[in-house]
Amino acid sequence: MPVNLSTPVAAQLLPVAGVSLGTAEAGIKRADRKDLLVIKLDEGTTVAGVFTSNRFCAAPVIVAREHLAAGEGIRALVVNTGNANAGTGDPGMAAARTTCAKLAKLLGCSAEQVLPYSTGVIMEPLPVDKIVAGLPQAVANLNANNWFDAANAIMTTDIVAKAVSRQIQIGGKTVTVTGMSKGSGMIHPNMATMLGYIATDAAIAQPMLQQMVSEAADRSFNCITVDGDTSTNDSLMLIATGKSGAIVDAANRAAMQAAITEVATVLAQAIVRDGEGATKFITIKVEAGRDEAECKKIGYAIAHSPLVKTAFFASDPNLGRILAAIGYAGVGDLDVEKLKLYLDDVLVAEHGGRAASYQEEDGQRVMKQSDITIRVVLDRGTVNATLWTCDFSYDYVKINASYRS
Amino acid sequence: MPVNLSTPVAAQLLPVAGVSLGTAEAGIKRADRKDLLVIKLDEGTTVAGVFTSNRFCAAPVIVAREHLAAGEGIRALVVNTGNANAGTGDPGMAAARTTCAKLAKLLGCSAEQVLPYSTGVIMEPLPVDKIVAGLPQAVANLNANNWFDAANAIMTTDIVAKAVSRQIQIGGKTVTVTGMSKGSGMIHPNMATMLGYIATDAAIAQPMLQQMVSEAADRSFNCITVDGDTSTNDSLMLIATGKSGAIVDAANRAAMQAAITEVATVLAQAIVRDGEGATKFITIKVEAGRDEAECKKIGYAIAHSPLVKTAFFASDPNLGRILAAIGYAGVGDLDVEKLKLYLDDVLVAEHGGRAASYQEEDGQRVMKQSDITIRVVLDRGTVNATLWTCDFSYDYVKINASYRS
């Protein structure tokens, strides 16, 4: 079950003027479930995104990048679940282009004004006919109040939908930021099997929008990991319609960035809280390092260690496994005598070994919680980094040993 | 259960003249099991070793390195299970030194002539009094025919003991190589929670012995991974007593190296076959790469992917997960259109997607085997690398969620 995460309340998801959403049951992998989403954007909307770094990036990722680069102005996004259209070669590219062309025809725009996204099984042919057949239903359903439905339609192994809204004031105008995400496995830095869509009715010019989505991703989706796998399809999109009349400029940019980053962080953390088989949400803070790279190296070594993750699943304060992970993180000149390890507020290790004050029952108490912070103080610099991950349970294996069947 | 691996036959483990072994029940973590091993070496024996690269290396690793460097000639090794004496600070160092001093007294040598090894839980104080109390029993049992008992005494979560012998002819003399290892989790390149001891009755001078153990490790223990964790305690030792009368020199060195590497490879693969929860033994061959580093990067990305490992556990040819792992391995200029992916002899993917000839039932047939080879042909160079790993099952989680209890 998701860790301290519940389904969003539909009524709390605020529409974003200029954005409408429609879903359909296209029967891509299974019948009787919504598996297709169309997001329609009003003219004048700016769109920016960041994508997976996987060399086997999926066909829709390649096409979405091309269409963004074409600069004709994006008018729609289309997302299918049930099939990733990755590792599908030329037929996969053709399928992604066909999807865009067919939707463009329905909406009266060009194919280059449509961005495609797919998530699901890799290396199986995309059933593009089913998607094309489902598009009219999705278009017929387009509505600004459909964020909850949309968040449900993009789920794969997710247990709960992930969506959130925030509002801020800019220049006396109320600006809305609403976002949704999907993903619960194959989650890693540099994106994950995750799709994220964040829209605002502020007006944000294209170059600034690209910087803002990159910064938001770096502080949110690029700080989470479930299993260390980086997907072929990851995409985080930021959409700005301008319909609120508020214009983002140098003076108010920081406030806007903060709102976007906050929405992105809630959505990213929701992915970890809904991590496949997760029973614990773990925040890893690596502090007082020389640079961000070494803080993240140590953080990810802890976050990716199956031994650490299974110990958290068992609520077993077998905390030497964290020391071992710190030790092999690849920080060559790390002085283990100087670092301190905390579990929440409990000092666990210092001077290269167990802290004199450490009591097993204190560790046990923290380990039983569902939200836990691991804090490593390196005492060699002034830089900090924070990551989020989850534990590793029987159910992770169960889910991933049976995902296709 | 171990994958195609059975307990060695005691009678097939050949004694190595100049090496005697004795075990004891010291009650370090549990009663009624052998958990202490003494290996006594005749005078004139040379010893070399390679050790963990973990920054949190255990106290016995530090002491063993010191004593090897002292150059007084090693006369004994002592190994305990049940406690790793790692992350134990100054008291851990004192405990390791005490163990050496006490054994030295029993054997009539100096403390610097004894090498200590520990394996088990990290960050708990070593119960050195129990070890010291058990030493006389182990010394009383010393016998050249005790390799089987010794291999059993060093097990932790291992299900079966790991030991093997080979013989070769050098200069008309029969040379024996017998080795044993332990380890089944926390297994990673650059060693693992593994201990390995290989002894031969050939005479090998110290500098050559060090080169030979490094080369053997690079082709064996440094090519295996179970869970990507690198232990604090890994050590592989190579012992040469010279008692056969055969002297290793430039002319016969290759034959000797081959025998040592073969023994090391059998012992290393046995660790993977006995990997925690393993049901499949997977050989990963990455071929036609530009250099060994990129071949290993890709091999380890596949070997460490929990998604790949759970698919193998399920015998599910969800092979797109392998493409995804290749894609995020970090080979920046990899052309995915050119590579080919095989499962045993079945061509699975080429031209960036599923091979036209690929049939799901062929993939399914191979996935059901207990020994499987994944072959990735990069078509960008002439270098190959081979790694060995295992799948990821419910039992891995079970074992590691309950290891201490």
Image: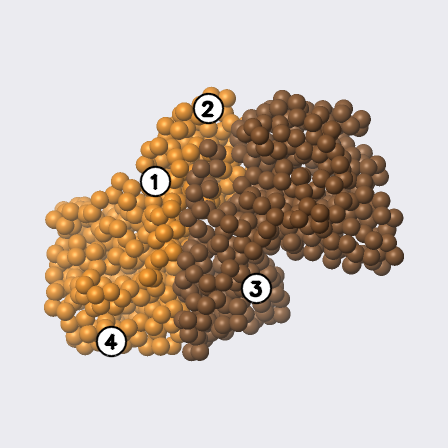
Chain colours: A orange, B brown
In the image, residue A125 lies at what x, y percent? 34, 72
Taking A136 as reference, is B302 above or below it? above
Amino acid type, mark 3: Lys
Q: Which disc number belongs to residue B285?
A: 3
Q: Which disc number belongs to residue A358?
A: 2
Q: Earlier in the sequence, mark 4 or mark 1?
A: 4
- As measured in the structure, the alpha-carbon distance from the residue carrying label 1 to the one carrying label 3 is 36 Å
Q: Chain of mark 2?
A: A
Taking A189 as reference, is A84 above or below it? below
Q: Are marks 4 and 2 on the same chain?
A: yes
Q: Residue at x 60, y 53 (%)?
A: B269
Specify the quadrant of the image occupied by residue B283.
Answer: bottom right
Q: Chain of mark 3?
A: B
Taking B53 as reference, is B288 above or below it? below
Q: Earlier in the sequence, mark 4 or mark 2?
A: 4
Q: Which disc number belongs to residue A129?
A: 4
- Say which element carries label 2: loop
- Say which element carries label 3: strand
